[in-house]
Amino acid sequence: MSNDALAHPDRIRASHWITVLIRQFPELQAELTPSPHRPGLGLGRQRGGTDRRGPSEPLRLRVSDTVRDITDGVVELEEAVHDRLGLPPTGRGTVEVRLARLAALLERVEADPLLMRHLLDEISGMARRCSGALGDAEPVIRLRGRCPLCASVSLRAFPLRRAVLCINPGCRCPHTACGCHADRAHRHSWPEGEWAELTAGGALALEEIAAALDEGSTVAAVSR
């Protein structure tokens, strides 16, 4: 049996998000490259190949801020992993090179649950932010089983936000302070820390939810 087959789910998810970010980050950098047809306009082409007349300044700033923050975040994360594992200081490298080095350390990181959780949170957060800055529409994955609140077959997984939502507009939870009571457009959601509520009845397993979310985010990353 391969090491991957024996890997902890967090290690599998961390590897997935590193792969997604390695694919996304160069495209994010490319968004700042001026169009060869209209130098200086910055974001030269939309998805699908349609020319833009030039980005708004807030959009340009959002992309450049995201590039900077992810670059700094990856450097800091690699340094933190090396420090925690007692490894020599990190060498120089691009974001993609550093991410590849982190991927090579996942087996060692897995032995430290706190470090693995930190790495997973940081990497998944950066990948989702990168997707948001690229303007990717978030894929929606249908889950089997019924909503524990309304009994409808209406559970959907949203990979970029790592959450499950009930899309039944009439669904309401018992907590009156929840937004589903105050706003008719609100859809009740279960973030990752609340998935146990969805699995309590046995209709879903945690592994099924995580697999659906990871599959959806991979499709979003490779379909561009």
Image (tube, grey):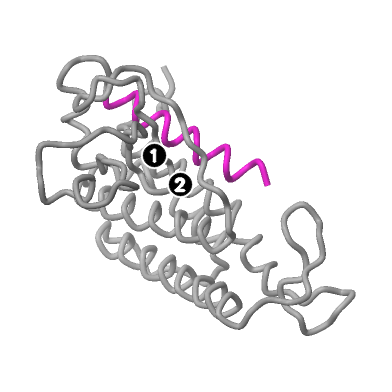
Label 1 residue SS: helix
Q: Position of residue 155 (x, y in %)?
A: 34, 28
Label ID, residue 124: none
| Residue on which disc 1 sits | 13
| Residue on which disc 2 sits | 17
Q: Which residues are magenta?
A: 206-224
Q: Are marks 1 and 2 in contact (CB under 8 Å)?
A: yes
Quarter of the N terminus within the rendering: top left
Q: Is residue 111 above or below residue 45?
A: above
Q: Position of residue 124 (x, y in %)?
A: 39, 51
**Which of the pair 170/20 is nearer the observer?**
170
Amino acid type of disc 2?
Trp
Q: Position of residue 38 (x, y in %)?
A: 86, 79
Q: Quadrant of residue 180?
A: top left
* Majority secondary structure in the magenta region: helix
Distance between mark 1 and mark 2 Cα atoms? 6 Å
The reply to whether the magenta stretch includes residue 219 is yes
Q: Is residue 57 left or right of residue 42?
A: left
Q: Is residue 195 above or below residue 153?
A: below
Question: Which residue is found at the position 43% from the left and 41% from the top?
Answer: 159
Q: Is residue 201 above or below residue 15?
A: above
Q: Is residue 181 left or right of residue 122?
A: left
How many numbered markers are drawn?
Answer: 2
Q: Position of residue 7 (x, y in %)?
A: 34, 30
Question: Which residue is found at the position 56% from the left and 53% from the top?
Answer: 22
The reply to whether the magenta stretch includes residue 52 is no
**Which of the pair 127/140 is nearer the observer?**
140
Question: Which residue is found at the position 31% from the left and 53% from the top?
Answer: 121
Amino acid type of disc 1?
Arg
- Callout 2: few (<14), some (14-19), or many (20+) C-alpha neighbours within 10 Å? many
Q: Is residue 178 left or right of residue 58?
A: left
